[in-house]
Amino acid sequence: MATAAIELKNITKTFGSVVANKNVCLTANRGEILSILGENGSGKTTLMNMISGIYFPDEGQIFIDGKEAVIASPKDAFDYKIGMIHQHFKLVNVFSAAENIVLGLEEEGRYDIKAASARITAICQQYGFELDPKKKIYTMSVSEKQTVEIIKVLYRGADILILDEPTAVLTPQETQRLFAVLRRMRDDGKSIIIITHKMHEVLSLSDRVAVLRKGEYVGTVKTAETSEAELTEMMVGKKISLNIHRSEPKDPKARLEVHHIDCSNREGALVLDDVSFTAYSGEILGIAGIAGSGQRELLEVIAGLQKSDSGAVLYHNPKTDNVDNLQNKTPLQIRELGVRLSFVPEDRLGMGLVGNMDIVDNMMLRSYRKGKGAFLERKAPKDLAEHIIEELEVVTPGATTPVRRLSGGNVQKVLVGREIAASPTVLMAAYPVRGLDINSSYTIYNLLNQQKEKGVAVIFVGEDLDVLLELCDRILVIGSGKVTGIVDGRTATKEQVGLLMTKTEGGEVHE
Amino acid sequence: MSNAVKKHHEPLIHITKRDDMIWWKAWLIRLAAVLLGLLVVGVISVLLTKGNFFETYSIMLRGAFGRLGSGSTRLLWKFLLETALLLCLSLALTPAFKMKFWNCGAEGQALIGGLAAAIVMMKLGDKLPYWVVILLIFAAGILAGAVWGIVPALFKAQYKTNETLFTLMMNYIAMQLVAYYAYVNAVPAGSGQIQSIANGHLPVIGGQPYLLTILLALILTGVMLVYLKYSKHGYEISVVGESQNTARYIGINVKKVIIRTMMISGALCGLAGCLMVAGIDHSVNPDTVGGLGFTAIMVAWLGQLNPLIIVLMSGLIVFLESGAAKVADTFYLNGSYADIVAGIVILFVVGCEFFIRYSIKFRHKEGKA
């Protein structure tokens, strides 16, 4: 067998106490497409950043064509003919495609945009791209911008191409076109590394698959010799027991019904596609999915922070037995309907709390409208702040400390404490234990369980499947904005959920 | 080789963020900064004028407050008036800045308020009872200022236009409108400017023509302090300023808060314009506000958007400018001298905040290689 185009040996990278990559070994050959598969936070992007010179590995070696290489900067990476296409494009909007492609190149002779355009057209013809070199970036679609990024690295002579989740922003048709181009490049002898977590893409496109899990290298398999089930198991691993307490739901009643919600983002792409489910009182409904599959949009639509295109969000009021439609109401209108909806958003200091305000003023966010007159009432929020500090053991110099000074776990306790203090009937929490240590995490699990036992409908968006499977009564799995399945938290297996997470377009592969 | 092990040197100075300093310590540092700034001013003045070091300060004091024991309080009143006007405009800008809305249009908002007041004085001054005219002057001035504030706010809220450029442009519109009005309605006719408007002068209280303005500025300080700190509106302004996402999340109507706050900001500028035109100048021209609207931007920030500190800063700036003008006069220096003096002291005042927020540690000598 010929020497590998690129070989990684025992690559380790740590950020503080977090191990992003540990002893990763990986090879990519000429003329093949290698997929890197892994959950969120499994270290895929960190690894690719080390190959493209953005990070430098703490330990380990990189070999290019059998010779050891030192890649300390993106420029070094270019010298080794490595080109990376990032998830977020790095293009100058007011420049044309050709100008962006030659930008930063130090070529001999005069700046000749015509010659560059001719070369770009030649590259396009060779691989079957469609691109007008004169077109300005700001008039381009997402797919065209991606084409510019790919040609940019080809123009620089790259023969090892790394693509970080290239299909996340593409329509199925554009994806097929991209894959056709990638296959042509492979046949031309280039090696292509593609980061993805869409299983059907892995199976239809790649020659081999390397799997990472929690920063560690699990193994590489030939696509032809593997199956979806085997890859999923490699990706999610065996189940670990966490011993999170879970009680049986008592007297569950439909509390929140979501019917056929469609929601599009600013670019007009559908981020929620016909989402329907029901959340019951006295249960924890988990929401699992790859990051960015529409979880945030779903919660924001329910909370009235984002408009949906169609559908309904029906709330069954336990006090009045009324059913209200919350769709496209503002948060204030929702509150005025008597809906006690609490929401712990993903972005704690950017949305749930105000970092520069103290704990008392942050308590007031929910309650400042109370009381007559134009003036604020600070007594009740102060009592609440002191109560939460004591009850949840928040480590803080005092109730008048700005929350940005607190550690992540304590910030979250303040936020969750405030949301629970509003005695909600529906409690939504997005990634409430992200970045928290074990003890704080268990405090949060206990708080959610207490709410469930009080008859609150809890919606928990999580990323750790082990936690979801032990905490939740039911788990809704979302993939690319669609509900791919709702499973029972007590009987479902990790593989089952993992398969649903990576299933898109009904799991069918259209060639 | 680029992967060679890099040796770490301990840097010579180490800057770390400190916890909150006790308030009186912070104020001692600020006071020291002002004194240090004045000291540098003194040294530079001596170099420029070849005069006596201490004489510079006494001329400065005399320029700002008048000769002590001379019995003349004219300059002292003038100092208080200028401080009050600067204070009014700075306070007007404070809520907008707290909301992170960069209102650079205090100049135009005050001028348009002054213009509205002048129009009422000229057109209705002799036709309606005195107190009705006075009320109309305030109503018209405040309304005109509010409109000048609302327009950029509407565009910001609706179309996310840049408020800095927008408010600056509105200044020019106000200036041109005033220039046009003064040309067409000149008093005496044909002179191209309004010399003095006969009717609708604001009442003089206690025999002091400036006292009304000064009292109003003081009342405004108290009102603004309470509004920002203890009212629901003030709380909404802080939340919108800190994070619009949080504001949306708790159901604050962000557009409404932006428009309402700019209405207040513009209205207060308009009020200041009224005071200048109907209370002091009894005339209006494009230079009526005289750049005070821009100085106010600096004062509001120097005062850390705290009305009480803004009072002190307004006084400091007016003292430096009038004191330095007197020094420049005495030694035949040109107008830049006053700017130099103000610049030096402000540099120290701003610079000292660094020492309040950060502590600096020097590397131990023995660590040196």
Image (cartoon, coloured by chain):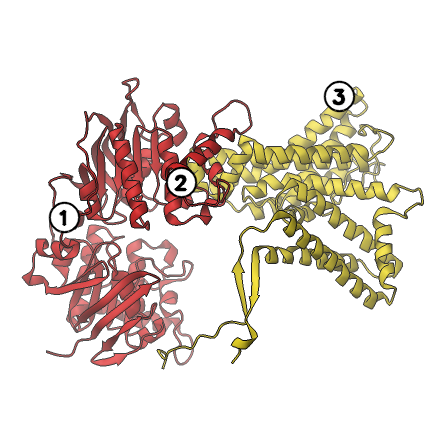
Chain colours: A red, B yellow
In the image, A21: left or right of B217?
left
Secondary structure category for the residue under label 3: helix
Kind of residue at disc 2: Val
Tell me the number on the disc at residue A494. 1
Secondary structure category for the residue under label 1: helix
In the image, B251: left or right of B207?
left
Q: CA distance from mark 1 to mark 2?
A: 32 Å
Co-location on one chain, circles 3 and 1: no
Residue A508's spot in the image, x, y percent? 11, 49
The extreme top residue here reads A320
Give the number of the mark in front: 1 or 2: 2
Q: Residue at x 94, y 45 (%)?
A: B70
- Disc tally is 3
Give the number of the mark in front: 3 or 1: 1
The extreme left residue here reads A225
The quadrant of the rendering that contains the N terminus of chain B is bottom left
Q: Is residue B179 visible?
A: no
Chain for mark 2? A
Secondary structure category for the residue under label 2: helix
Residue B108's spot in the image, x, y percent? 67, 42
Give the number of the mark in front: 2 or 3: 2
Tell me the number on the disc at residue B172. none
Q: Nearer the viewer, residue A404 or B99?
A: A404
User: Could you classify mark 1 by the number of other residues whose Cα lies within 10 Å: few (under 14), some (14-19), or many (20 or more)?
Assistant: many
Residue B136's spot in the image, x, y percent? 72, 25
